[in-house]
Amino acid sequence: MADTLTFRYATYLASAPDKVWHALTDPGLTAAYWGHSNVSDWRPGSRWEHRRTDGSGVADVEGTVVASTPPTRLVTTWAEPGKGADPAGPGVSTVTFGIEPYEEIVRLTLTHEGLADEGEREAAAQGWYAVLANLKTLLETGRPLPSAPWTMP
């Protein structure tokens, strides 16, 4: 990944590590704040899918669970459907969620590596800002934002 770009972002939540982990890995909760269900058994080597919530069952992203250490670390590859078989292949990126407790809060650090260019890095950044804001709102208030933040112009 030497010729690729990385996006990193951290946010702080009034939550517990197990609740953040559950929100990242439970299909019903991801549907509530992400607009897609993240589906897997979350064991290293297992496949995962980022499925639409419109009932079509279509996965817009798929990949492999690289590492899974509940409730502190989750690493997955990300690729377009049908292109993620080789974790080191072209068009495959890696996302790491780090979950660190501190007193009554959690720092959630996201690292998205293997982005092809600045345009892809910027698109990833805009998506992650919206998704993580919605996750934070859901965990702290019990409901997601009233409008999907990724649709805001």
Image (tube, rainbow, N blue to C red):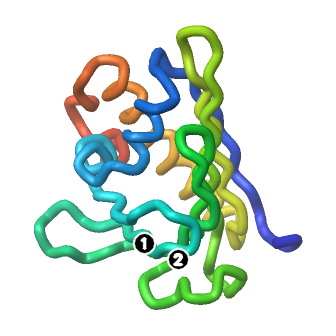
Q: Position of residue 30 (x, y in %)?
A: 32, 48
Which mark, residue 143? none
Q: Position of residue 92 (x, y in %)?
A: 62, 77
In the visual, does 61 lie left or right of 105? left
Q: Kindly identify the residue that appears in the image at 40 percent across and 63 percent down.
A: 41
Q: Residues within 10 Å of mark 2 (few under 14, many from 20)?
A: many
65 above or below 92? Answer: above
Label 1 secondary element = strand
Which label's residue is closer to the chain start, 2 or 1? 1
> Residue 60 or 70: which is nearer the viewer?
70
Please name the amino acid that badge 1 sits on.
Val
In the visual, does 32 lie left or right of 132? left
Which mark, residue 61? 1
Which quadrant of the structure image shows residue 134? top left
Label 2 secondary element = loop
> Residue 138 or 26: which is nearer the viewer?
26
Most extreme residue toward the right, as rendered? 2
> Residue 91 or 37: which is nearer the viewer?
37
Please name the amino acid that badge 2 sits on.
Ala
Query: Spatial distance from mark 2 to mark 1, Cα to Cα?
Result: 6 Å
How many numbered circles does the render carry? Answer: 2
In the visual, does 22 lie left or right of 109? left
Q: Residues within 10 Å of mark 1 (few under 14, many from 20)?
A: many
42 above or below 35? Answer: below
Residue for badge 2: 79
143 above or below 110? Answer: above
